[in-house]
Image (cartoon, rainbow, N blue to C red):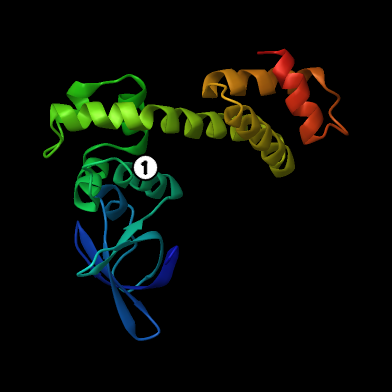
Amino acid sequence: MIDHIRGQLALKTPTYLRVEVNGIGYGVHIPLSTYDNLAKTGEKIELYTFLHVREDCLQLFGFKTAEEKEIFEMLVSVSGVGPRLALRILSGLSVREFREAIGQENLRLLTAIPGVGKKTAQRLVIELKEKIGIALAVEETEKAAKTPEEARLINDAVSALLSLGCKPAEATKAVKEAKISLPDKGSSLEELVKDALKHL
């Protein structure tokens, strides 16, 4: 798996670029959202990447942010959505707009993207609503944490509640309330999860 790539931007177009690394040029397919935030040709660049493997070829897809890559991976996990359509969706909607469209089941916004019909839009909502909810829950807990260690503890607690069948919003709310009720120092993951269960 090629997780990221760092090198010199040798070629830049709205949907495709070439990154030169130690004399080797890597062709990378990108969404428009990434293109808008690229450096100038000849400058150093770093991208999050996803390697798509097919019987007849290997394709590398690149993203400026981890959030774009995360949404792309969610999209290609949906039946009937390939990398090309996933790029088109990311080119038509920002990460925030896509999350809101899924969360609000906004089929009109999704079907406005070329190649996304009503059935595909419905499938996206059905298969991704929970995943989007989990991602937003984790993001919200990270913002609430005072330190990286606290963020990890809260995220682990939320993940534990999600694995027990809690909904993302419920898990986030319960962990936040538990964090308030417990002493700032010395609260372990086990203590935080136990107390959070009392707030469900």
Which quadrant does the C terminus fall into?
Answer: top right
Q: Where is residue 85 in the image (x, y as percent from the top left)?
A: 19, 46
With respect to residue 76, does 134 lie above or below? Answer: above
37 left or right, relative to 182: left
With respect to residue 81, does 107 lie above or below? Answer: above
Q: Position of residue 142 (x, y in %)?
A: 61, 35
Which quadrant does the N terminus fall into?
Answer: bottom left
Reading the image, the residue beneath label 1 is 74
Q: Which residue does the image show at 31% across and 32% down from the upper left?
A: 98
**Farthest residue toward the top?**
199
Q: Is mark 1 on a helix, strand or loop?
A: helix
Q: Which residue does the image show at 77% across and 34% down from the upper left?
A: 189
**Amino acid at pointer 1:** Met
Q: Which residue does the image show at 21% across and 29% down from the upper left?
A: 121
Q: Callout 1: few (<14), some (14-19), or many (20+) C-alpha neighbours within 10 Å?
A: some
138 left or right, relative to 4: right
65 left or right, relative to 28: right
For residue 50, what is the image quadrant?
Answer: bottom left
